[in-house]
Image (spheres, helix red, strand yellow):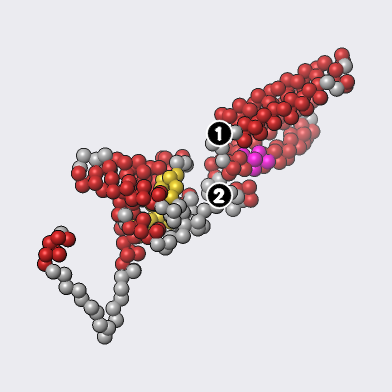
Amino acid sequence: MLLWLFRGIFIIVIVSVLVVSAASTQLTAAENSTSWWSVVISGMGLIVFFLLLDVVTPKRKLTALAGVFFGLLVGMLISAVFAKAVDMIGETYNIQLVDTAKVAIKWMMGICICYFTITIVMRTKDDFRFVVPYVEFAKQTKGSRPLVLDTSAIVDGRIADLCESRLFDAPVVVPRFVLNELQLIADSADKLKRNRGRRGLDVLKKMQASTVVDVEIDESTAAEIEEAKGVDQKLLLFTKIHNGRLATTDYNLTKVAQVRGVDVVNINDLANSLKVVALPGETMTMMKIPLNSQSNML
């Protein structure tokens, strides 16, 4: 509602400026009819173009807009330099061109350069974030680095208790493709896999209902993640792009993540590190469980 109110204010302001400008005595003069029509057509065209651009692209990101702005700025600076080069080439080789031809060449060259710089920025914005316009404005979350869960960690279930204990003071992120894999396991014809998948969904639902754990289902995926083959490769790319830590119980995935420079938290290694250490000479109390109790536990 607030966005549509802002759009209404924008239309009122721009139309008011257009009407005031078109009604000026200088433009309404008979000899300036071309200028009057230029102002009116330009104003209406800009209103329609930017409103359509606003409505058609609802999911634009600040990083993408910053990248486009930075690419456009660099392209304009390079175009200004090359425009001087065009004049210098014409004077050096005595190429006689009318002013209209020079302006057309400069405009086309500038548009091409701006297009090229913007495409370069959009393709490399995830790799070179140290440039000032690439500063990311992330939402305020608990902790600095998110904890990305894979299917094995969710199905295992211990991650829910670990997060409840506030051991991980960070937001928990579950990518969409992990949730899809969990659903496929829950729909499996194999009874064991089906039970594991349903248990994972129950664990995830429990974590979402918790007031301590901040769980987010990430719907956005970059093009390079979509092109990756296999959920494990997508997980590694997703974790690396979002500067997070991967939580898993998969031994092989842990080793691959370490080789590729991705921070990983293996739940099994964490459980082993929490075992009680008994020193030589310490007394230990052993509890004897009756046979009937053992059978009931089994």
Residue 224: in sight, yes or no?
no
Which quadrant is the C terminus positioned in?
A: bottom left
- Say whether residue 90 is magenta: no
Specify start and end residues of the magenta stretch as a single range. 68-73
Residue 222: in sight, yes or no?
yes
The quarter holding residue 32 reads top right
- Tell me the element at label 2: loop
Residue 33, placed above or below residue 138 = above
Q: Position of residue 48 (x, y in %)?
A: 65, 24
Q: Position of residue 74 (x, y in %)?
A: 67, 42
Q: CA distance from mark 2 to mark 1?
A: 18 Å
In this rendering, the count of numbered labels is 2
Mark 1 crowdedness (10 Å alpha carbons): few <14, some 14-19, many ≥20: few
The quarter holding residue 279 reads bottom left
Numbered label attached to residue 58: 1
Which circle's residue, 2 or 1, is located before the other in the chain?
Answer: 1
Q: Position of residue 26 (x, y in %)?
A: 88, 21
Residue 122, placed above or below residue 130 = above
Numbered label attached to residue 50: none
Mark 2 crowdedness (10 Å alpha carbons): few <14, some 14-19, many ≥20: few
The quarter holding residue 227 reads top left
Q: Residue at x 77, y 34 (%)?
A: 87
Q: Residue furthest top?
A: 30
Q: Is residue 8 left or right of residue 192?
A: right
